[in-house]
């Protein structure tokens, strides 16, 4: 894992910016959960897609073709998520929300708006303590009816894989967004509204390759936001970002939080 590489002067600039920010927006991707031992999607050696291609698993067509394979792959990921713990990067984002939304800074007399938008479906931001979380791609711990889309909290124990929907008898499926499916409209609208209003936009642990989430940072740039990317690697956003804090989020974010709280 690469060590954080950014100058103390950049950190000082960022602290000053955060101390007068009115709305801070954070977009996270699979990279922030990497240090919780949840594989990202595109890291070749460990990526979730290393063993399968997305088309075989994360599409309605794949589910219709082989519902058992898709259900079992998500069951495997759910077990991975259940064993995972929020890492220092998740915890630092929860501290950042708490810090900014209270009138905690001497130099200000207002709380800062804070919105956390995630592409992740693992629920680790909520487990870390973040309250205002927009889940663009759903949540792997929620289940819905494949045919009706209604959320199903419980169903009879069964040998059937996938289990049948208790309402219509069709298949149950995870409440996550698959390729080719539309994102939850309210979540998407709220995310773009937040990006539009943001004066600081963090892009953390995302390769910025999947739309429409990848457009949020540019929406923020159009609104005049300072864009801060946190990633060990460069991405298509890097050249347009104001700052790249290069390194693992689990190391970079605690450094940022310590400096902000001093
Ligand atoms: P990717 O796997 O595409 O990208 C993960 C990013 O995290 C990469 O840029 C890595 O360099 C970076 N990264 C790895 N370790 C990190 C660490 N410790 N700290 C910070 N960054 C780290 O995952 P996403 O960008 O989230 O969509 O992928 C976006 C979407 O593509 C996913 O939500 C999923 C997938 O198809 C759906 O499921 C609909």
Image: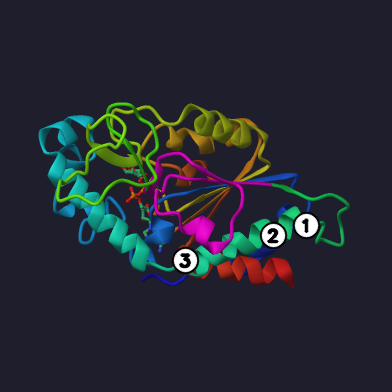
Q: Which residues are magenta?
A: 114-141
Say if 260 sits above or below 200 in the image.
below
Q: Is residue 40 visible?
A: yes
Q: Name the residue at 59% across, 70% down.
A: 255
Q: Which residue is mark 1?
A: 102
Relative to residue 141, is residue 64 depicted above or below? above
Circle nearer the N terminus (1, 3) = 3
Q: Is residue 236 left or right of residue 27?
A: left
Task: Give the side of residue 108 with respect to residue 16, left or right.
Answer: right
State which quarter of the image contains the N terminus. bottom left
User: Who's the residue at 72% across and 56% down the image?
Assistant: 100
Q: Quadrant of residue 175?
A: top left
Q: In terms of secondary structure, where does tag 1 sit?
A: loop
Which mark, residue 98? 2
Does residue 17 belong to the magenta stretch?
A: no
Viewer-side residue, 257 vs 161: 161
Q: Earlier in the sequence, mark 2 or mark 3?
A: 3
Within-10-Å neighbours for mark 3: few <14, some 14–19, many 20+: many
Give coordinates of residue 259: x percent, y percent: 68, 70
């Amino acid at each position: 894992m690469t060590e954080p590489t950014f100058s103390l002067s950049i950190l000082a600039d960022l602290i000053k910016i955060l101390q007068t920010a009115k709305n801070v927006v954070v977009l996270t991707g699979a990279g922030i959960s990497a240090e919780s031992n949840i594989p990202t999607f595109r890291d070749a050696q460990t990526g979730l897609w290393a063993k399968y291609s997305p088309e075989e698993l994360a599409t309605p067509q794949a589910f219709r073709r082989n519902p058992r394979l898709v259900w079992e792959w998500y069951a495997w990921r759910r077990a991975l998520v259940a064993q995972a713990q929020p890492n220092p990067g998740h915890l630092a984002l929860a501290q950042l929300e708490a810090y900014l939304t209270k009138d905690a800074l001497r130099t200000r007399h207002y709380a800062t708006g804070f919105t956390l938008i995630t592409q992740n479906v693992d629920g680790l931001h909520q487990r870390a303590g973040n309250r205002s979380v927009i889940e663009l791609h759903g949540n792997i711990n929620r289940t819905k009816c494949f045919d009706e889309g209604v959320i199903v909290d419980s169903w009879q124990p069964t040998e059937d894989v996938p289990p049948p929907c208790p309402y219509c008898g069709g298949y149950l499926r995870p409440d996550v967004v698959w390729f080719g499916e539309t994102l939850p409209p309210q979540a998407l609208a709220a995310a773009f509204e937040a990006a539009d209003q943001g004066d600081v936009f963090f892009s953390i642990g995302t390769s910025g390759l999947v739309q429409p989430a990848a457009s949020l940072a540019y929406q923020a740039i159009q609104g005049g936001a300072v864009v801060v990317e946190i990633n060990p690697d460069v991405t298509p956003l890097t050249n347009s970002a104001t700052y790249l804090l290069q390194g693992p989020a689990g190391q970079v974010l605690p450094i940022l939080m310590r400096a902000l709280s001093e």
